[in-house]
Amino acid sequence: MGLSLFTPLSWNDAGFILTGIWNTVIISLVAILVGTLLGLIVGFIRSASNQLVNALLGSILDVLRSVPLIIQLILFSTYVGAIGHPLPPFAAGSIILSLYAMAFMSEVFRGGFNSVPPSMPLAARALGMNAWQTIIYIRLPIGLRTVFPSWLGVALSVIKDSALVSVIGYMELLRTSEQLISRTQQPLEILIGVGIFYFLISYPLSLYGKHIERKMAL
Amino acid sequence: MDYEFHWSIVWRHMPEMLQGAFVTLHVSVLSMLIGILIATPLAIAKLNHNKFFSPIATVWVEIARNTPGLFQIYMAYFGLGALGIHLSPYVAVLCALAFVNTGYLTETFRGGFQSIPKTQYSAAKSLGMSRFQSYRHIILPQMFRRIYHPMTNQFIWAILMSSLGILVGMNELSGETQRLQSLSFRTLEFFIVAAVMYFIITKLVLLSTALIARKLFKGEI
């Protein structure tokens, strides 16, 4: 009997795969949440401020969008290591993924805020609302309603891009599957399983986005 | 900060970095061309509800749009390898990129075709043009003008996605950077230069596509 180096996939691996799934879900949620909050703030600032501030913020966001995510992740995790404060992969990954989400979401929200007719906040002020009330009751609800499908699109791409955090050592779904592949040598079965998982998350959400878009168009 | 930057080693390896940047551009352009070639008939099939090709187009589009790019590259490199189809890293990344581009472009083209008024088709027909002629001379030129901007975005996106070649050992900009930094351990320096190069590449591409658009459409965009 020859020595077997590779052991096939078994039910014992379920826990390992579930950890990967959980890690993918959690880092995506963190990045979408933080990215949305920061994106709201930056988007609002960009829609409300003068050209100079706008150009400055815009160029920073432009860098975040024009440099591949994988390079940003490697750079950031090496940088924090080099200055003597290494971060665990989850922290470094969430920070970069959140900033990446912020860069795209701020643009979406900015478009939404700009779509609010200027007469509306003015009318609210005339009714005696203060600046905060105008933001909370007028600008936010009216501005955000139209951009929901675009926001959902960015959120979906963040879920998919979370796979890249594996390069700095975060054990998300794709990296767990990679390790299973190197042990079992069954790449096709495992990869198809991983693909189905991403598809099952992403497809219903994208259908929902399309549905909302169609409803709003009417 | 205790870290000392040593830039000279990066300058010494600049020719290799530039070579990598060239491969990045090369693979992205090729993947776009393949994408356009396959997406055009797929979009037409989808609009005409072709019994055979329309379902293929739908499945293609949904898989391309709803799975991560990294998964697609792994599929092309490791997945096809399991079936006995061993692709080189370059070809694997090219296949994955072309697959995704086709998926997104099919939807873009479909939207473009739908934005052309039905009267244009009838007018072409009444002038005695065949189906092929009306697409070639009337529909496609108008369509490409309308979807030029989304296509540029797709191109930029393909350039950025090609950086995933680093994970299958391809020799494009990221992969080359990875190889060079592993020889010298000057990780920060090499990747900072790579980031700057990606930024410059995307800006140059945007600039040149804008210039091409001006030439092609003569200000009608």
Image (cartoon, rainbow, N blue to C red):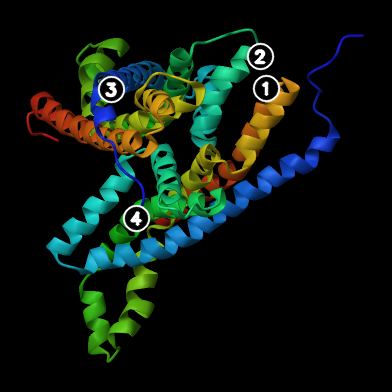
Kind of residue at badge 4: Val
For label 1, the residue is: A187
Residue A97, percent across and down? 46, 50
**Which marked residue is nearer to the observer: mark 3 or mark 2?**
3
**Residue type, label 3:** His
Query: Residue B149, located in which quarter of the rendered image?
Result: top left
Chain of the residue where label 3 is placed in the rendered structure: B
Query: How many badges with numbers are in the image?
Result: 4
User: Amino acid under label 1?
Assistant: Pro
Q: Give the Cα separation between the discs numbered 2 and 4.
A: 41 Å
The reply to whether label 4 and label 3 mark residues of one chain is: no
Q: Secondary structure at mark 2?
A: helix
Q: CB of mark 2 within 8 Å of CB of mark 1?
A: yes
Whether residue B221 sits left or right of residue B33 in the image: it is left
Which mark is in front, 4 or 3? Answer: 3
Q: Is residue B76 visible?
A: yes
Query: Taking B128 as reference, is A41 above or below it?
Result: below
Residue B170 is drawn in which quadrant?
A: top left
Q: Residue at x 49, y 16 (%)?
A: B92
Crowd rating for badge 4 (residues with CA inside 10 Å; few <14, some 14–19, many 20+): many
> Looking at the image, is mark 1 or mark 3 nearer the viewer?
3
Disc 4 or disc 1, which is closer to the eye? 1
Secondary structure type for disc 1: helix
Q: According to the image, label 3 marks what residue?
A: B13
CA gap, disc 4 and disc 1: 38 Å
Q: Are marks 4 and 1 on the same chain?
A: yes
Q: Which mark is residue A108?
A: 4
A3 over B183 or under it: above or below: above
Label 2 is placed on what type of residue? Ala
Asked which secondary structure carries label 3, the reply is loop
